[in-house]
Amino acid sequence: MRRFYLLTVFILSSVALTEGDPSSSRSITPCYKVPQYCEENESNIPRCIEKKMRNCTFSQPRTKNPDFYMQTVKSSYEVTVDTVYGHAIHIPSEAVLKSTREQLGNGHELHLTVSVLNRSLFEARSDKGSPHEQVLGVWLGNQDVHDLSHPVRMVFVNVYQKGSGECVFWKLSTNSEQGSWSTDGCNTIQNNTNFICECNHLSFFAVLISPDVPDPVDIQRLEYISYIGSSLSVVFTVVIIVMYLCHKKRKAGQTLIIHIQLTSSLFLLHLFFLASSIWSSAEWGGCWTLGFLLHWALLATFTWMAIEGFHLYLLLVRVFNICISRYRLKLSLVGWGVPTATVMICGMAGAYGKYTLMENSSRTTSLCWVTTKAARYITVNGYLGLVLLFNAVILAVMVVKMRQLRARKIQAGNRVRRMWKDWASLLGLSCVLGLPWGLAFMTHGPQSISLSAIYLFTVLNAFQGVLMFLWFLSITCKSIHEEQQSTKGSSMSNVTSG
């Protein structure tokens, strides 16, 4: 009886000590529950995971966990683990042999543990980019594995399909609570679809993705160009509208009315662009409204550029004889109605808000814009592509017509002057038809080409209002000159007849 009593006291004391010792309770945590435990109970999550993964219980979860992989390894074999995300980890036999000699003196089994973690658990930022969506934690037994002559090989799927990447591991700091991403002991190999990381140790591994964006200096210059150009475009489009209103008493043709509508849409586009850039940090409702208006103004600009091409087509085909009932009203309904219907649909789908254009460690460039990728591709990229294709065909037909007209007139004396006038007309029509917007499709590719295209795109489209002013001024002066010539000719005719 006394022995039974002593045994009971011993058991109860052992249980009490185990419950009172936090380290004891943590040591029996199943490996697949370690990340969740550290998230809920520790502030330095990576350090907690690193420590507890070496002393956890090697038990499989009841239901398959796509973020956890564990298998028993033998000392003479290589080991490969494939994840459901497409990533793969290859452990060389050297690492297994090294771990076996150091850890299996008592004959226990050696376990390989792989955990797929979210990058949000690792708070450090790097100038080289942001981590891949998933971080791979790899452990072999309960000892540190390092200084391998045959590296551990990991394959990360490049879900971004653009930009460059660099393989890194999470380096735990001994002097502070936080860690940092480091490339020590890691080598990067990149192909079209994957990042291949070769490292001489085991730890947390990731790929820092560096999108092909300009340097911070270039970003700042592009911002200055955009702000200055848009501000000048707002001023000069207002001047165009005022000039039109002042001369409205003179009969305005269909072409001039369409130019004014395009100018008005450009004025709204640059105005809302400046507002969206300046107040991108506004509350959700304010940024939603600015994104809505900016999208509407951009689509209106694209639509009126298409209408310019359509009107030019009628002039070329019908030879200045357009007889369509309520022609202006129909054009206005299309020019302003199509963008309005489109943005209403996008607005109901919640497609507007704060959108990050470019981001690095020093600054973030944001805009109130379309945040849904599908809406941007369809309503901006796709719509712009169709408009540019249509207007490019119209401009090509225009060039052919001009060459045919020039071929009928044999005037060798003014050939150089006529050539300059033709080029000036061609450049003016290209601006009106919005062909410089096509540079947006050239901003993807080699860094040297894309950066030049970005600069040229920014300059031409930020100053499009200024270019429209010069075009409007030239056709106005030409119209006034023709009227004066006509008046002078009729006066001379009257004098002669008198």
Image (cartoon, rainbow, N blue to C red):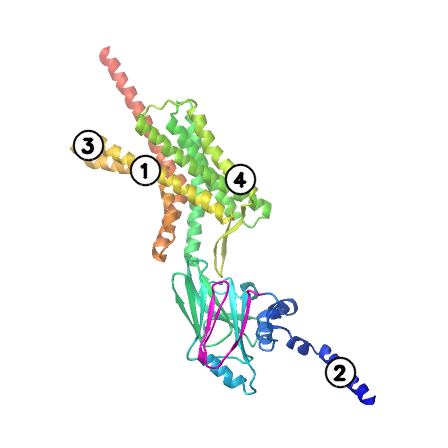
Residue 463 in sight in this render = no
Work out which quarter of the rendered image holds the N terminus and state it. Answer: bottom right
Residue under pointer 3: 407
- Magenta highlight range: 64-93
Question: Which residue is label 1 attached to?
Answer: 393
User: How far is disc 2 from disc 1 in space, using C-alphas?
Assistant: 90 Å
Residue furthest out toward the right: 1
Earlier residue among tags 2 and 1: 2
Residue 328 pos. (x, y %): 43, 26
Q: Nearer the viewer, mark 3 or mark 4?
A: 4
Amino acid carrying mark 3 in the image: Ala
Residue at horizontal 29 percent and vertical 35 percent from the top: 397
Question: Given this view, does label 3 or label 2 mark the residue nearer the observer?
Answer: 2
How far, Cα to Cα, is label 4 from label 2?
70 Å
Q: Which amino acid does label 4 sit on?
A: Ile
Location of mark 4 (residue): 345
Residue at the image point whose x is 38% and y is 37% from the top: 468
Numbered disc 4: secondary structure: helix
Is residue 358 positioned above or below 285 on the image?
below
What's the mark number on residue 11?
A: 2
Q: Which residue is drawn at 36% across and 43% down?
A: 436
Give the class, few, some or many, for how many residues have Cα within 10 Å of label 1's Cα (few <14, many ≥20). Answer: few
Q: In this view, does 301 lie to the left or right of 122?
A: left
Q: How far apart are marks 1 and 3 (CA)?
A: 21 Å
Tag nearer the camera, 4 or 2: 2
> Quick check: can you spot residue 150?
yes
